[in-house]
Amino acid sequence: MQFGASYMPVWAVIAGQATVVAFPPCRGRPISGSNTAYQGGIPKMQRPKRPLLPIAFAVVATFLSVLSTGVQAYAVDAEAAEQKTRDADVALKARQYQRAARLYEQALNMWRELAASGANVTDRVRHCRANLIFALSQPLEDGVRRAYQLAGAGKAGDASDLFVKLAARYRKLAERFPSAHFEQNHRYCLSQSYLVLVQAGDDRRSAGKHAEAARLYALARERLDRAKPVLDERQAKQNEAYLLHRLATEQFRRRVAAREPVPELEFTTFDGQIVRLRGYRGQHVVVVFWVAWCKNCTGKLPYLDLLYQALRQRGLAVIGICVDRLPAWDHGTADEAVRFARTRLSFPCVWADDRVMQAFGNPRSVPSVVLIDPDGRLRGAPEADQTHEALSALIRELLETR
């Protein structure tokens, strides 16, 4: 059985061109009993010659088309980012900080996308980021100036509250846009939130408004506790020590102004004997804190001793409380204090301890004087830098009153 010699076409697309591939006619004999198979096997396909040059041209054309499309897309994206940056610059120059910040953020994201695709746009990224930080900071810096104005107007509490709010806003900006600028200003506002209160407390203290000063110092301590985690540890400790001193001092002065009773105290004399403060009821008592290495103390105490000897018959008592053994005051001069007291002073001297210091407002300077009336109530706390004559006049006036 003989099949026709015609070809069976099969279509293939190579490089965009249709090419006919044909099978040759079967040359074998049909197998006995079958008219559907061929003897001699499956015919082999003839391989056509590939058109290589059109394929190369097609590949190059495709590459150039993609490259051209990418360049065009980059040019469009870069122009859009540049226009957004120019709009942001105009808004910043007009001091429209909120609008400028929004535009700079959008432009920054566009420049970063271009940078991720390999474009060299580092300068534009840096420009937008720096101006974004500047635009975001300006309203907060206006707030800082407003806080100082409030403090200068005597509204330290309002100024402190505003600094706390500004610190919170700086913290949020630092989380959203990591920047040393925002972190530093966050710490700065937290520190100012208590420092303005300390300054106001010092002003009230100088004006003799001790109750108000104590209130401001107490609030300052609360704000300092909140700021501690982000402050320098050494700075925080120094500020805390200063605040505790001021707070204790003003609270004690408030007690003096209210003529509160002195707590029941026991003292240990240099000879090891126990002296109780209630044993001095009925007398005007001058309590003086001192330390042996303080030249001002060793210079004034002999004059106070002369006053004691002159007025003891009129009901004047003096107790010298030496702080040489306390860690904050210890310079290794405790033995020298004992020798000085035994040779130069006739009134009893005792050692200070924490309870005694707290009862008298934790004095941080010496000599420090406290006056107690015959009923055991606080009567006065003269400034330590008073002259001997001024202190003598004050004590004589105290003896004339009850």
Image (tube, helix red, strand yellow):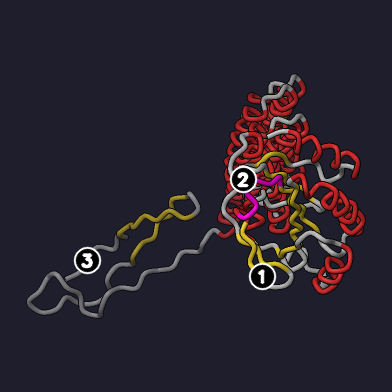
Q: Residue at x 72, y 44 (%)?
A: 371
Image: magenta residue range: 279-284
Residue 284 rendering spot, x and y as whole percentages = 71, 45
| Label 3 vs label 2, nearer the camera | 2
Asked where in the image residue 159 lies, by quadrant, the reply is top right
Q: Residues within 10 Å of mark 1 (few under 14, many from 20)?
A: few
The amino acid at mark 2 is Gly
Q: Residue at x 65, y 34 (%)?
A: 257
The amino acid at mark 3 is Phe
User: Does residue 195 appear left or right of residue 390 in this picture?
Assistant: left
**225 part of magenta stretch:** no
Q: Is residue 3 above or below residue 160?
A: below
Residue 53 rendering spot, x and y as whole percentages = 60, 57
User: Does residue 50 appear left or right of residue 105 in this picture?
Assistant: left
Viewer-proximal residue among 89 and 153: 153
Q: Quadrant of the C terminus?
A: top right
Q: Which residue is mark 3?
A: 3
Q: Which mark is residue 273?
A: 1
Residue 259 rendering spot, x and y as whole percentages = 62, 37
- Give the CA separation, mark 2 to mark 1: 21 Å
Q: Secondary structure at mark 2?
A: loop
Residue 48 rendering spot, x and y as whole percentages = 46, 64
Q: Which residue is mark 2?
A: 376
